Image (cartoon, rainbow, N blue to C red):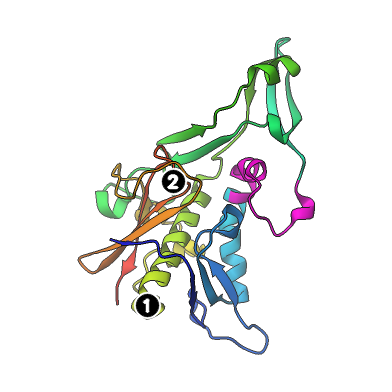
Amino acid sequence: MHNHKPGKTKIGKCIYCRVGPTNDDSLQDEHVVPFAIDGSDVLEKASCRICARKTSAVESRALGQDLKGIRTVLGFRTRHRRKRSSTLPIEVLRNTGEVEEVDVPLNEYPRILAFPVFPPPAYLSKASYQDGIEVVGIQVIQGNQEFASVADKYDAQEMAVYVSKYPKDWARMLAKIAYGFAVHSQGLDHLSVDDTYVLNSILGVADDVGMWVGCDGETKLPQFPSIDHMYGLYIVEGEIHVRVKLFSFPEAPEYHVIVGRRS
């Protein structure tokens, strides 16, 4: 297995459509793991303006909605620091039976990481498959936090935050991460457009992400408590497989992505 070697890799053409730089579009850098969750590996000059717009849309709901709370609480990087809120919404069920959304200070917001759990990729399991991706569970990791005083403050019988509402966007983001890591590790010359299985899903051309992305129940990446991210790559019968673990806590699920055939 080829493990994570952090750093920058110069590409010089769009990794999605393979167009080179022009006077109107000098190409943008691509983070393997999104910048918004502290991804450090960068593919330099690797995305044209059109494809960058498409792929950033892949991440926007997973990062901007499902992970917004934990990103804000942990102070992850943002390109829009002035827009960062000092409060976040939670839903409370008051002792009176009334349900209300309340904006709470960051120190009162639940420190929760929640990950969608998927079936194994249909390509591997040979399960009947039509489109999209199924969610078979939610894996929740909760920080050591005392909620009794917060509940008392808001007269709350129960408190809730909503996470993992956009599982298909998560899966497409994972496919994008795996593909970016494959390019980082193997080089773009070994990943032709026709042989990259996840490319159409990443770009929104096909609704087949569940064919290539899933959870196989295996643990192959190192286990240690951290908010860093891990990935590893290996070749099986000429095909590139990437394992991705966002936030390296032992409880976090390990995702398996079949990226494509190595050229």
Q: Does the magenta stretch include residue 133?
A: no
When the figure is inspected, residue 206 is found, relative to residue 196, above or below; the finding is above
Q: Which amino acid does label 1 sit on?
A: Ser
Which numbered circle lies on residue 242? none
> In this rendering, would 52 be left or right of 179?
right
Disc with the residue nearer the chain's start (1 vs 2): 1
Residue shown at 66%/47% (left/top)? 75
SS category of the residue bearing label 1: loop
When the figure is inspected, residue 12 is found, relative to residue 72, above or below; the finding is below
Mark 2, Cα crowd under 10 Å, few <14 / some 14-19 / many 20+, is many
Residue shown at 63%/83% (left/top)? 26
Residue at the outermost right position = 82
Q: What stretch is highlighted in magenta?
A: 63-84
Which residue position holds label 1? 192
Residue shown at 57%/53% (left/top)? 37
Q: What residue type is labelled 2?
A: Ser
Q: In which quarter of the image is the C terminus?
A: bottom left
CA separation in Å, label 1 and label 2 = 31 Å
SS category of the residue bearing label 2: loop
Percent x, y of residue 15: 48, 75
Percent x, y of residue 207: 45, 57
Which residue position holds label 2? 248
When the figure is inspected, residue 211 is found, relative to residue 134, above or below; the finding is below
Front-lying residue, 208 or 3: 3
> In this rendering, would 74 be left or right of 133?
right
Percent x, y of residue 222: 34, 48
